[in-house]
Image (spheres, grey):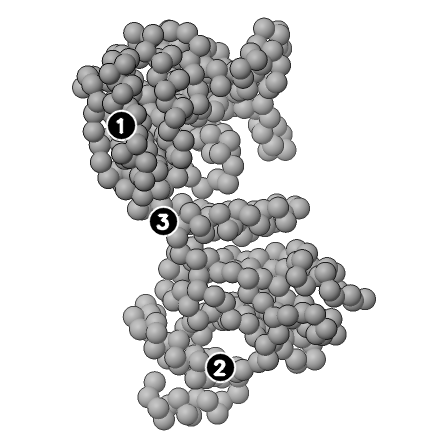
Amino acid sequence: MNRNELLEAARLPREARGAAIAGAMPSGCTRPTQMYLIREALRERWPVCEDVRNAPRGLRVDGLVRVDSRSFYVHGFACDNASPIESLRIIAPDGSEIELAERAFRHPHGDADGFYQSDFRRRESGFIAYIATDREQLSDGWLAVMENEAGEGLEARSATAIDEVNLARQAILTHLRFDHDAKLLRDHAHPAIERLQARLKADAAGHETYELGAVPTSPGVSIIIPLFGRIDLVENQLAAMARDPEVRQAELMYVLDSPELADELRAKLTQLQDLFHVGSRVVVMERNCGFANGCNVGVARSRGRRIVFMHSDVVTAKPGWLSGLQKHAAGIVGATLLYADDSIQHAGFRVAADGTVEQPGKGLHKDMPLAPTPIDAVSSACMMIDRKDFDAVGGVAGCFVDGELEDVDRCLRLRRDKGLISFQASSGQL
């Protein structure tokens, strides 16, 4: 748009001005900053009221998360104590508008509902929404606009969108405390997390791989242990494994998802290798990419025909646990995991008819007789799977908020595709 076209468009009614903004830029958005300036020149202005005390209405954007270049997650509050809200929309930097009035998740908001009293509206001023746009967007320049039935309205600007993936994920997960019927999780949190995980997966890469001690070049089994934050737990775990000759024939691999601890981990594992003489391979992730992507990178760099995933806080109870898992010919094989008092921490997952996940026997003593219970899934705290089956189900998906659901999903996908699932009560103790 040139200057004369802008002046002409500015005289149009609001609806026509919106069409002029939308038509000012071809699909692909190669000049997003220019598009934002056009929007600012043409858009209608509204009053601002982000402090709801002693005001008839209020609107505020508390935060914006950049999920990817075309999808965002927004939250804030919108309330009107004089007239019902007719429209609540988000205006992107390129001028496109997304209506939230009917689709946003609403919840009580402490900064708004604590002050307002009304005969016609519920105490649900807070709004949360996952939104998608047709073209790539800037992280700055987002607006919220609210209008009531009387034609009165407010606008509120958003701060720059959170772009760091782990901070974005954390911001989304904190809102699940408001969810009362899974609507927030289903319609907003899950699609946002799924796309964030896709970003992490695309960026997931091992920065460095090194070996300490003698490591088999053609192992039958690779034991993959993801590490995040705490690396001190490997000492107790390795001390137990050092007594097991079967482990020395396997490929022991650590995947460090906290690259800032790379030097500390190398020093610790070097000391442990000198002490226990158990060789290991270490993959240091280029950046923190989460448990799922760490597992996938670990498998890609491992050499074994069968893969054992193990958490770093699992300590094997006695030698021979690995052959106990391997005697199952196919499918996913799990292990009984115990607390320090010999009560059951995990003995498999069972998916109920309503879709909820149960853990049979959890909390009972290991010696207590249990009725035979079909098992639908096992925990990746100690899980064996053939490499070909792991590849067949697409690896670890990483799109679930709950890690247990991630494990259940992987098992159910394998059973759906191949009818294979096993459970071996054998090895570990937490």
Name the outermost residue toward the right. 119
Helix or strand or loop: what does disc 1 sit on? Answer: helix
Across and down, in percent, residue 127 comes to 60, 60
User: Residue drawn at (58%, 46%), measured in percent from left and top?
Assistant: 176
| Label 1–label 2 contact, CB within 8 A | no
Q: Is residue 333 visible?
A: no
Q: Is residue 132 above or below residue 425?
A: below
Across and down, in percent, residue 9 comes to 44, 88
Q: Amino acid at mark 3?
A: Arg
Across and down, in percent, residue 82 comes to 74, 74
Across and down, in percent, residue 3 comes to 35, 91
Of the image marks 1 and 3, the number of the one nearer the N terminus: 3
User: Residue drawn at (27%, 14%), measured in percent from left and top?
Assistant: 275
- Which residue is label 3 attached to? 199
The disc placed on residue 43 is 2
Q: Residue 221 versus residue 375: which sits nearer the camera?
A: 221
Q: Is disc 2 surrounded by few (<14), some (14 to 19) or many (20+) residues within 10 Å?
A: some
Query: What is the C-alpha distance between the residues marked 1 and 3?
Result: 32 Å
Query: What is the C-alpha distance between the residues marked 3 and 2?
Result: 33 Å
Helix or strand or loop: what does disc 2 sit on? Answer: loop
User: Residue drawn at (31%, 43%), measured in percent from left and top?
Assistant: 287
Q: Is residue 62 left or right of residue 422?
A: right
The N terminus appears in which quarter of the rendering?
A: bottom left
Q: Is residue 394 above or below residue 419?
A: below
The disc placed on residue 267 is 1
Of the image marks 3 and 2, the number of the one nearer the N terminus: 2
| Label 3–label 2 contact, CB within 8 A | no
Q: Is residue 403 above or below residue 96?
A: above
Helix or strand or loop: what does disc 3 sit on? Answer: helix
Quarter of the image for residue 135 reads bottom left
Q: Amino acid at mark 2?
A: Arg
